[in-house]
Amino acid sequence: GENISISDIKFINNDTFWVVSSQGNIFKYSISLNKISELKLPPNFINQKLYLAIDDNKNLWIAAEYKGLYKYIPESEKFIQYHKDGNTDKHNMFISIFYDDNGFVWAGTDGDGIFRINTLTNKVTVFKNNNDNKFSISNNTITHINKDINGNLYIVGKKGVINVLVKKNKDIK
């Protein structure tokens, strides 16, 4: 077979995981079956840098560098695209993604802030830098998102600036 350069991997369970190649292909691999299958992506995904997250329902969230944010539902094999303010003409440039334990997908953009998607209601909230609000994120380019063992969310902006959202009572405050 041909060699594939891997850029991301997300486990569904102890046996199965999703892999994204640096060429923008996504594969599902089963260890016990030793089987790999390629996810058929929309045509506009070709040559996109992709970032992955998996929610509690085993849906695959795909942040595409130039084509927006999508949820892939394996049971129905459907893709749902998420837009800011219902604007379907503009595709935000997504460069990071993370699923937290509270049912939120966080997707970082290159210049448009951070999107928070409630996976139960599909409500999209966008957080941006606001110079008049000292509690807003410090940068609109979000390169990494992760959490610590206490559930605090770390949002890394351009030039390494880190914002911390402290977890209180199962909600991010």
Image (cartoon, rainbow, N blue to C red):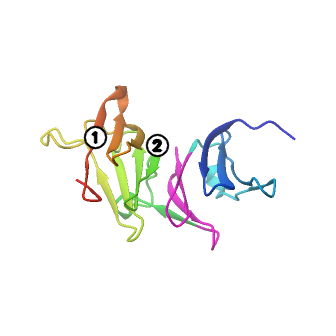
The local secondary structure at tag 1 comes to strand
**Foreground pick, 77 / 56:** 56
Residue designated by label 1: 164
- Point out the residue furthest to the left here: 132
Q: Report the residue at 75% width, 53% height from top.
A: 31
Give the magenta range. Answer: 51-78
Q: How busy is the neighbourhood of tag 2: few (under 14 within 10 Å), some, or many (20 plus)? A: many
On the question of residue 83 being in view, the answer is yes
The x, y position of residue 126, in whole percent, is 31, 53
The mark that comes first in sequence, 1 or 2, is 2
Under tag 2, what secondary structure?
Answer: strand
- Seen at 45% across and 57% down, the residue is 89
Q: Residues within 10 Å of mark 1 (few under 14, many from 20)?
A: some
Question: Is residue 46 visible in this depiction of the protein?
Answer: no
Looking at the rendering, which quadrant does residue 153 occupy? Answer: top left
Q: Position of residue 142 (x, y in %)?
A: 38, 39
Circle 2 is placed at which residue position? 96
